[in-house]
Amino acid sequence: MEQTKPMRFYQLFQNGEISANKINDYINEWHEGTSEEPLYEYLGLTREQYVQRVRRSIVHERNKLKRI
């Protein structure tokens, strides 16, 4: 019998089953685990989606620092 893969962060997020801030839990799980797949695949993202997310995060942090 074929085993189905558990849903990834992005699939759960798109389905409205978890909030965006849960991504950190998944990232920590990946760091603590033994997965050999890239983080973006572990999260259920394409490489391009992951790069966009990182860029948005950097811009957001820069904007926060400018306000200080």
Image (cartoon, rainbow, N blue to C red):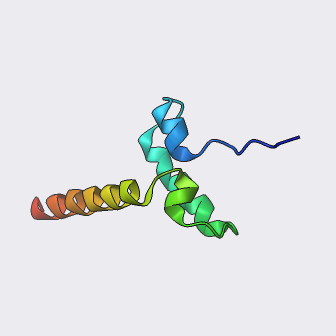
Q: Nearer the viewer, residue 63 or 36?
A: 36
Residue 51: which quarter of the image? bottom left
Residue reaching furthest to the front: 1
Q: Is residue 38 left or right of residue 50?
A: right
Query: In the rendered view of the protein, which quadrant contains the N terminus?
Result: top right
Position of residue 36 measured from the top left corner of the image (x, y, whole percent): 65, 70
Q: Nearer the viewer, residue 50 or 19?
A: 50
Q: Nearer the viewer, residue 24 or 34?
A: 34
Which residue sits at x=47%, y=52%? 45
Position of residue 54 measured from the top left corner of the image (x, y, whole percent): 33, 61
Vertical relation: 17 (above or below) 2: above
Q: Is residue 53 left or right of residue 63?
A: right
Which residue sits at x=43%, y=45%? 21
Which residue sits at x=26%, y=63%? 58
Vertical relation: 9 (above or below) 48: above
Position of residue 32 measured from the top left corner of the image (x, y, whole percent): 65, 67
Residue reaching furthest to the top: 16
Q: Nearer the viewer, residue 17 or 1?
A: 1
Query: In the rendered view of the protein, which quadrant contains the C terminus?
Result: bottom left
Residue 26: which quarter of the image? bottom right
Which residue sits at x=59%, y=68%? 31
